[in-house]
Image (tube, helix red, strand yellow):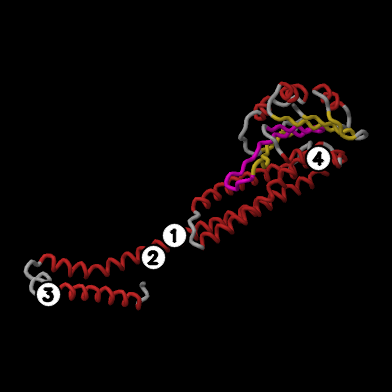
């Protein structure tokens, strides 16, 4: 069921009962209407098509998911697509919810498929300070975009802590390659999303849209600065994570070199021993113990001495 709110300059905010009440409120001077639609229903279709009269292409986009953030000017209103944080319990699987927002001279229409906590916080804030809507629909749009931007800000610190933890684990010799790759993908997707939304808000703050008066632009610039700072922080964490990734590969290569060195030295030590064993193994007349009782012990002692001498030599040269 759509949620409808009208702000009257004299009477303050009041919830609207239905479509007809929304039509009446839109016709009243100075009234700001907020229609929040979740999912698709006959009432939602009627509001989008009949009450607000949005373009069919815009309505088609509303009911299609997975759009990139953007802003489109339809002369009588602006159509924005942004994404709000929906689930951040796992950094490697950050989930967002698409929010369609129409901004007109005296209305804001939002549409989403799932729940968006940021919108609930905007409602709570307006219930405590309804005079924020006195500035018009653009200030309501700013409040929504500001809450959405603030929802992403704590992620920068969480990524920083996780990258620091991964760095410590890698330096301690733990195998964290899978976690690094997961986090790299998640960080890349989030950075692209935040950068795209930064560009959307930048357009509202700088472009000459009739729906965004000059007195509202500083507020949108503030949201843009938050998103720009977040983008920079995510880029820094991406660079740090790339450094951890490179360190992991360097340490892995170093460990592999150490293993190969040990195997090479073992092969080198075994070479003369294999030679001696091969010589006696092919000589049927002079095999140990055929003519001399202590030949085998002497041969073993000789082979052990050669191996010990080579080992001591390798240690002296610091190859072991």
Which residue does the image show at 37% across and 63% down from the upper left?
A: 259
Q: Counting residues from the N terminus, which is met first, the one under dot 3 or under dot 1?
A: 1
Residue that label 1 marks = 252
Residue that label 3 marks = 293
Q: Counting residues from the N terminus, which is met first, the one under dot 2 or under dot 4?
A: 4
The x, y position of residue 180, in whole percent, is 53, 52
Which residue does the image show at 16% across and 72% down from the upper left?
A: 296
| Whether residue 155 is situated above or below residue 174 in the rendered picture | above
Residue that label 4 marks = 124
In reply to whether residue 94 is colored magenta, the answer given is yes
Q: Counting residues from the N terminus, which is met first, the one under dot 4 or under dot 1?
A: 4
Find the distance from the CA under tag 3 to the CA under tag 1.
Answer: 51 Å
Q: Nearer the viewer, residue 209 or 78?
A: 78
As drawn, which residue projects farthest toward the left? 285
Secondary structure under the numbered disc 4 in the rendered image: helix
**Left or right of 167 on screen, residue 222:** right
Q: Which residues are magenta?
A: 88-112
Q: Counting residues from the N terminus, which is met first, the one under dot 1 or under dot 2?
A: 1
Residue that label 2 marks = 258
**Left or right of 174 on screen, residue 201:** right
Find the distance from the CA under tag 4 to the CA under tag 1.
Answer: 53 Å
Find the distance from the CA under tag 3 to the CA under tag 4.
Answer: 100 Å
Characterize the local packing of mark 4: few (<14), some (14-19) or many (20 or more) Cα atoms within 10 angstroms: few
Q: Nearer the viewer, residue 40 or 196?
A: 40
Examine the residues drawn in magenta and state their main secondary structure.
strand
Secondary structure under the numbered disc 2 in the rendered image: helix
């Amino acid at each position: 069921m759509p949620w409808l709110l009208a702000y009257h300059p004299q009477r303050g905010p009041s919830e609207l009962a239905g479509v007809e009440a929304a039509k009446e409120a839109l016709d009243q001077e100075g009234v700001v209407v907020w229609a929040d639609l979740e999912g698709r229903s006959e009432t939602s279709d009627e509001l989008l098509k009949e009450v607000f009269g949005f373009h069919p292409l815009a309505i088609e986009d509303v009911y299609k998911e997975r759009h990139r953030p953007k802003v489109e000017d339809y002369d009588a209103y602006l159509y924005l697509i942004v994404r709000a944080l929906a689930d951040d319990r796992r950094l490697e699987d950050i989930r967002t919810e698409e929010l369609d927002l129409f901004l007109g001279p005296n209305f804001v229409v939002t549409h989403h498929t799932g729940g968006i906590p940021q919108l609930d916080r905007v409602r709570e804030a307006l219930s405590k300070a309804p005079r924020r809507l006195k500035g018009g629909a653009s200030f309501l749009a700013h409040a929504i975009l500001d809450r959405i931007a603030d929802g992403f800000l704590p992620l920068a610190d969480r990524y920083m802590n996780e990258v620091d933890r991964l760095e410590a684990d890698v330096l301690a010799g733990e195998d964290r390659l899978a976690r690094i790759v997961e986090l790299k993908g998640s960080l890349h997707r989030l950075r692209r999303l935040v950068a795209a939304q930064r560009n959307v808000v930048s357009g509202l703050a700088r472009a000459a849209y009739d729906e965004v008066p000059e007195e509202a632009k500083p507020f949108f610039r503030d949201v843009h600065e938050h998103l720009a700072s977040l983008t920079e922080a995510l880029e820094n964490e991406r660079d740090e994570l790339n450094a951890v990734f490179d360190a992991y590969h360097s340490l892995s290569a170093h460990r592999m070199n150490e293993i190969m060195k040990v195997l090479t030295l073992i092969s080198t030590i075994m070479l003369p021993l294999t030679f001696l064993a091969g010589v006696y193994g092919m000589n049927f007349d002079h095999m140990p113990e055929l003519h001399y009782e202590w030949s085998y012990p002497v041969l073993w002692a000789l082979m052990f001495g050669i191996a010990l001498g080579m080992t001591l030599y390798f240690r002296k040269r610091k190859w072991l």
